[in-house]
Protein backbone atom coordinates (compact mmCIF):
# COMPACT_ATOMS: atom_id res chain seq x y z
CA UNK A 1 0.00 0.00 0.00
CA UNK A 2 1.56 3.25 -1.08
CA UNK A 3 1.22 6.45 0.86
CA UNK A 4 1.76 9.70 -0.95
CA UNK A 5 2.36 13.14 0.41
CA UNK A 6 1.76 16.11 -1.80
CA UNK A 7 4.76 18.28 -2.46
CA UNK A 8 4.06 21.49 -0.67
CA UNK A 9 5.41 25.00 -0.96
CA UNK A 10 6.41 27.48 1.69
CA UNK A 11 5.79 26.65 5.34
CA UNK A 12 3.98 23.41 4.57
CA UNK A 13 7.11 21.95 2.91
CA UNK A 14 8.74 21.16 6.26
CA UNK A 15 5.64 19.36 7.54
CA UNK A 16 5.41 17.37 4.30
CA UNK A 17 9.09 16.38 4.59
CA UNK A 18 8.56 15.17 8.17
CA UNK A 19 5.50 13.19 7.05
CA UNK A 20 7.47 11.54 4.22
CA UNK A 21 10.29 10.56 6.57
CA UNK A 22 7.81 9.28 9.14
CA UNK A 23 6.12 7.02 6.59
CA UNK A 24 9.51 5.72 5.44
CA UNK A 25 10.60 4.95 9.01
CA UNK A 26 7.33 3.26 10.01
CA UNK A 27 7.49 0.88 7.04
CA UNK A 28 10.58 -0.67 8.62
CA UNK A 29 10.12 -0.18 12.38
CA UNK A 30 7.63 -2.15 14.44
CA UNK A 31 7.59 -2.94 18.14
CA UNK A 32 7.18 -6.41 19.60
CA UNK A 33 6.83 -7.67 23.14
CA UNK A 34 10.55 -8.48 23.27
CA UNK A 35 11.68 -5.22 21.62
CA UNK A 36 8.99 -2.54 21.86
CA UNK A 37 9.15 0.70 19.91
CA UNK A 38 10.47 3.89 21.53
CA UNK A 39 8.45 6.65 19.86
CA UNK A 40 9.62 10.26 20.05
CA UNK A 41 7.18 13.07 19.37
CA UNK A 42 8.61 16.57 19.16
CA UNK A 43 6.83 19.90 19.05
CA UNK A 44 8.25 23.38 19.28
CA UNK A 45 7.86 23.43 23.06
CA UNK A 46 7.65 19.85 24.31
CA UNK A 47 9.00 16.32 23.87
CA UNK A 48 7.08 13.10 24.46
CA UNK A 49 8.61 9.62 24.50
CA UNK A 50 6.61 6.40 24.70
CA UNK A 51 7.56 2.74 24.73
CA UNK A 52 4.87 0.90 22.75
CA UNK A 53 4.18 -2.78 22.08
CA UNK A 54 2.60 -2.62 18.61
CA UNK A 55 1.36 -6.22 18.61
CA UNK A 56 -0.65 -5.82 21.82
CA UNK A 57 -1.34 -2.15 21.18
CA UNK A 58 -0.26 -1.06 24.67
CA UNK A 59 1.95 1.74 25.95
CA UNK A 60 4.40 0.24 28.42
CA UNK A 61 6.09 3.45 29.60
CA UNK A 62 6.02 7.13 28.78
CA UNK A 63 7.62 10.43 29.77
CA UNK A 64 7.34 14.01 28.59
CA UNK A 65 8.42 17.52 29.39
CA UNK A 66 4.95 17.99 30.88
CA UNK A 67 5.79 15.63 33.78
CA UNK A 68 6.02 17.37 37.12
CA UNK A 69 9.62 16.28 37.68
CA UNK A 70 10.77 18.00 34.46
CA UNK A 71 8.26 20.81 34.00
CA UNK A 72 9.08 24.28 35.20
CA UNK A 73 12.84 23.93 34.95
CA UNK A 74 14.79 26.76 33.43
CA UNK A 75 16.97 24.41 31.35
CA UNK A 76 17.13 24.65 27.57
CA UNK A 77 15.15 22.28 25.36
CA UNK A 78 18.06 19.89 24.77
CA UNK A 79 18.59 19.48 28.50
CA UNK A 80 14.87 18.81 28.95
CA UNK A 81 15.05 16.20 26.18
CA UNK A 82 17.90 14.50 28.05
CA UNK A 83 15.78 14.39 31.20
CA UNK A 84 12.88 12.88 29.22
CA UNK A 85 15.21 10.23 27.76
CA UNK A 86 16.54 9.25 31.18
CA UNK A 87 13.04 9.19 32.69
CA UNK A 88 11.51 7.03 29.94
CA UNK A 89 14.45 4.62 30.17
CA UNK A 90 13.99 4.35 33.94
CA UNK A 91 10.26 3.71 33.57
CA UNK A 92 10.83 1.17 30.78
CA UNK A 93 13.35 -0.72 32.91
CA UNK A 94 10.79 -0.78 35.73
CA UNK A 95 8.27 -2.27 33.27
CA UNK A 96 10.74 -5.03 32.37
CA UNK A 97 11.94 -3.67 29.02
CA UNK A 98 15.65 -4.09 28.29
CA UNK A 99 15.88 -3.30 24.55
CA UNK A 100 13.82 -1.13 22.21
CA UNK A 101 13.56 -0.15 18.55
CA UNK A 102 13.97 3.60 18.08
CA UNK A 103 11.31 5.47 16.10
CA UNK A 104 12.36 9.06 15.54
CA UNK A 105 8.93 9.94 14.17
CA UNK A 106 10.10 11.48 10.92
CA UNK A 107 12.38 13.94 12.68
CA UNK A 108 16.02 14.14 11.73
CA UNK A 109 18.38 12.41 14.16
CA UNK A 110 20.02 15.55 15.51
CA UNK A 111 19.56 18.05 18.31
CA UNK A 112 16.84 17.16 20.80
CA UNK A 113 16.08 13.78 19.21
CA UNK A 114 19.72 12.70 19.51
CA UNK A 115 19.95 14.10 23.06
CA UNK A 116 16.92 12.04 24.13
CA UNK A 117 18.29 8.87 22.53
CA UNK A 118 21.76 9.31 24.06
CA UNK A 119 20.30 9.89 27.52
CA UNK A 120 18.15 6.76 27.19
CA UNK A 121 21.21 4.73 26.17
CA UNK A 122 23.22 6.07 29.11
CA UNK A 123 20.37 5.10 31.45
CA UNK A 124 20.75 1.49 30.30
CA UNK A 125 18.18 1.08 27.53
CA UNK A 126 19.55 -0.86 24.55
CA UNK A 127 18.78 0.21 20.97
Image (cartoon, grey):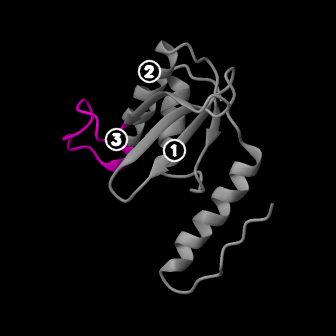
**Could you say whether the residue bearing mark 3 is in a helix, strand or loop?**
helix
The residue carrying mark 2 is 91
Q: Pick whichever of labels 1 and 3 is earlier in the sequence.
A: 1
Residue 113, compared with residue 31, is above or below; it is: below
Whole-percent x, y for residue 124 in the image: 55, 19
Would you say residue 117 sits in the magenta stretch? no
The prevailing secondary structure element of the residues shown in magenta is loop
Confirm or deny contact between disc 1 and disc 2 (CB under 8 A): no
Label number found at residue 106? none
Seen at 48% across and 49% down, the residue is 41
The residue carrying mark 1 is 40
Marks 3/2: CA distance?
Answer: 16 Å
Residue 33, compared with residue 44, is above or below; it is: above
Whole-percent x, y for residue 94 in the image: 47, 13
Marks 3 and 2: which is nearer the front?
A: 2
Whole-percent x, y for residue 43 in the image: 40, 56
Query: 93 or 77: nearer the eye?
Result: 93
Q: Pick whichever of labels 3 and 2 is earlier in the sequence.
A: 3
Residue 70, compared with residue 3, is above or below; it is: above
Q: Quadrant of residue 16?
A: bottom right
The residue carrying mark 3 is 80
Seen at 73% across and 66% down, the residue is 3
Q: Pick whichever of labels 1 and 2 is earlier in the sequence.
A: 1
Q: Which residues are magenta?
A: 64-80
Marks 1/3: CA distance?
Answer: 13 Å
Amino acid sequence: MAFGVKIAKGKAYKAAAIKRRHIRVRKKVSGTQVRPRLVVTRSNRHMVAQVIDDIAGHTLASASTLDTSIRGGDADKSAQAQKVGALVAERAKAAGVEAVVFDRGGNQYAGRIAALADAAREAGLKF
